[in-house]
Every structure is written in structure tokens, then in C-alpha cells.
Image (spheres, rainbow, N blue to C red):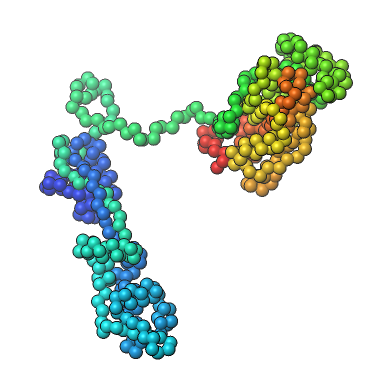
Amino acid sequence: MAEKILKYLSENEEVNTLKLAEKFQEDHQKIIGFLKSIQANGDLVIAEPVSQKNIELTEEGKLVANQGSHEANIFNVVPKEGISQADLMKLPNAKVGFSKAMSNGWVLVDKIVNPPLVKRKVPEIKDSVQEHLKLVDAGKSSELTEKDKAEYKKRKLIQESLIKSFVLKKGPDFSLTLNKLETDLTSEMLANGTWKTSKFKEYNFDALGVPPSSGFLHPLLKVRAEFRQIFLEMGFSEMPTNNYIESSFWNFDALFQPQQHPARDAHDTFFISDPQFSYKFPESYVEKVKTVHSKGGYGSQGYGYDWKLEEAQKNLLRTHTTAVSSRMLYQLGQQKEFKPIKLFSIDRVFRNETLDATHLAEFHQVEGVIADYHLSLGDLIGVFSEFFKKLGITELEFKPAYNPYTEPSMEIFCFHPGLKKWIEIGNSGIFRPEMLSPMGLPKDVTVIAWGLSLERPTMIKYGFNNIRDLVGPKVDLEMVQRSPICRLTK
Ligand code: PHE
């Protein structure tokens, strides 16, 4: 076809692509496609874009062209002796037809009789509307006056559309055949000098590249990117979480978690054997933590037991990212002047769990922390309602819970429309004064916080029932390649 077009152009000065489509009985879009492949061969033709207005019939216009105008149809059903207006109005399109027939002076309403009758006013009519629309249908709309066109447009019998096409002329490199363009520069071309005269195919920068065969993000990382984006949008800064190994002190003691607490047992926590202990802690703070655990303070009676430094020195794999939050809040308490702050973290934590379909010994936590003056439970609910809204979760419910470091504490439940049930998605609370006051934070500063796992929303989002399909040695690497990017709100 491309060569047929070139041949036509060699015999003619210029041609419109619409004309070519008609001549070669081809779809106009296809002709444009052939033009593009001609153009890819160099300046064989000059193509000037033109657009022309086209007038075509609307659905109603087609009806009129075939069956006559509504007003003519009305006139035609009115018998000599007349017809009751009510009966006339039962016909299709009678309202428009009747009012047009009236204003054309074709019919009249005889009100002397009761009920009034519609009668013919003239013996015969000419349906010029139908004739005009037939002309339009035959592509002869130029024979209509502007006034008629405007009228039919108003009556929605015709509509205008814009047709884009090209006018083609011979170009500076006009030829009757397409040369196959070179796609590669080869060593032979360089050696024998043909590269100087060869024509090369232009780069197509719009072409999709070859997909890389490695370097895909795991679904957990994709969901993490979404969570991070939400926190950043809400003005949170990210906490440094690059230490999986933590001391019991920051993981538990600083959080007012008593040393006999079952979570501090080796059945729940992985302790480190080498190095077994940490020795560097802020001394005066350690004293305060010891006092609040053993004797109380700040209005609390404490736990009343013998707090031991050796227990706090034990290294472990952190059991929650709240260990990092406690370090950050301590630093905040040490600043000369308190400034409100919003922090978040998303990173890995470790627990000595019995493995099953939804539990592994390691997972990721998503944690948000806000420190400001006089925050309330209402602020907490407000902030994470906003947070979860950005995840596309709008129905939330709360259940009282217990954490050694928060009071009150709430478990967060959300309604999962896919699973059609309420599921637990997170834990939250207001940090206790026994935790914050030893850190040096002012009395009227409240810290609200919440945490959830990264795995749970990822499993729901990507439809995994078994966590082992998502994490661990049984993961199908192709799953990682196939998984689309994550948009939590969609
Ligand atoms: N650390 C809690 C957990 O591991 C989550 C949490 C964070 C709860 C902050 C309250 C406040 O489940």
C-alpha cells in the first residue's frame, strides 16, 4: 500500500489522505499508518496536516432523512375533516412536529367546535427538511444555506465533527520504493565504508523497552513505599531503624515493661549470645528508670520489685520498633526546649513465635508516634482515622487493650469489604508518664502512637493466605516479578 501511495503521488501534484482512503477502499487510519512508515524512510513525502469540518446526521437526523420530518408526518396524518388534537398528540414526535407545522402555517386549530380539531390550512406541503437532510447524508451539505445548517444544528438533526487528514506532496527524497532501513551499525559497514551512504532507521523513543529480568521489588517493599508516602504526606519524619540488635533496656525497660514480664522470656524473645550484653547507657536516665520500676514516682507507685541492671543489659533482636521510638523520645526529652514532633518507622522486628500460616519469627512493623502538648485519645483516633483513610480504610472500631507502656491502649479493627468481616489491624495508645517523665519530657506533653504489621495489609492486598508464600525460602521468585505496584487506595 505504501508503494501504491507513492505511485499515485508520482502521477499527481498532491493528494489528501482522505481521498486516498476513498480511492484504495481503505480505512483512513490505516492510510495514516502507511504514511508513517513512508515517513520513517526519510523525506520521501511532505505531509501537511489539515482539518476540515464535516457535517453529519445525528440519529434523529437519519430518521428524518428516511421517514420525513416530524412536521410533515403530522401534516400527512391530518385528514380533510380534521382530527382531535389529543389523538394527534399520541403520535411519535408529535409535540415538535405539531408546533413546527403550526409555525410553518401548514395546519390550524379550529376552536369553534368542541373538542377543538386540527385541520389542514394548505392543500399540500413540500418536506424540504427531509430533502436537505438527504443532501447531508449524500455528503452534499455544501448545498445548504448557513441559516438552514444553523437551524438543523439547533434541532439536533445534524452535527459537526472535525476530520483530521494530511495533504501529501513529493518530498526532496521522493522515490517510488521504500528502502529497507538499516537498524544496526555493523563492523562490516565500518570496514567497507557503506555506513556513509546507508540509511538508518530513526530511534523510536516511545517504544517500550525490554523488561529487565531482575531487580524487581518484593510486594512488601512496594507496600512499604506506599506507607512511607502516606506518612511523609502527613508531615512525619522517618526514624533511624538500622539496628536489629537492641538492648533489653531500650526494648523493654525504657518502655516501663517490668523485668518479670512474660514477653521478656526466651520463649518470646530471641536473646543474643555474642555479644551478650550492652554496657553503654545514659547513667542518670538508667537511675530514673530503675527508680520508677522499683519505687515509682511521677504519681505512680511503680511495680515494687528489685530492678536489675544485668537484666536490662541483655542484648536481643528487637521485638518491636517501639524500641527505636523509645530512643528517639529519650533524645527529645534531653533537648533544652521541647518541640512537637511526628515520627514514623517501617522496619523488621523479631519474635520467637510458633510458625503458622500467618505468623513468622520476623515481620515488619509500621509505627507512628506524635509528641505534642495536651494530646488526647481523640487526637489519636483522629490521626489514625486520617492515616487509614489514606489506605482506603474508612470503617474503624476500637477495643480496649493492654500494653505495659501505654494507657489507655486500643486495638484497632477495620472492616474488610473483601473478606466481609472485622479484622484486627493495629495496636495503639498513649505512652505512660512512667515512661515519658524519666526521659525528661515536660509533664504536659503527651505522646500518642500506633503500630501495625506490614505483612497483614500486604497479604490482603496481594491475596496471599499463607505468609510463607510471601516471605521465606518457599517464595516463588516469579511472583515477585509478576506483582503489580501497590496503590493502597485502589
Ligand atoms: N509495640 C506495639 C506492638 O508491638 C505497637 C504499639 C506501638 C502499640 C505504639 C502502642 C503504641 O504491637
Percent coordinates x, y for residue 49 in the rendering? 24, 44
Left or right side of 282 for 80: left
Quadrant assignment, res 199:
top left
Q: Quadrant of residue 37?
A: top left
Q: Is residue 61 positioned above or below 330 on the image?
A: below
Q: Is residue 282 left or right of residue 67?
A: right
**Is residue 313 visible to the viewer in this orientation of the structure?**
no
Asked if 325 appears above or below 86 in the picture, the reply is above
Q: Is residue 88 visible in the rendered structure shown here?
A: yes
* 299 lies above or below 152: above
Q: Residue at x 61, y 40 (%)?
A: 389
* Residue 384 vs residue 375, the one in the foreground: 375
How many discs mark residues in the rendered view? Answer: 0
Between 177 and 145, the one lying in front of the other is 145
Query: Between 288 and 199, which is closer to the camera in this rendering?
Result: 288
Left or right, residue 244 beside residue 37: right
Which residue is at a point 75% across and 23% down the rendered structure image? 443
The percent coordinates of residue 484 (x first, y second) are 52, 37
Q: Residue at the front extreme?
A: 112
Position in image of residue 461 (x %, y %): 59, 39
Q: Quadrant of residue 390?
A: top right
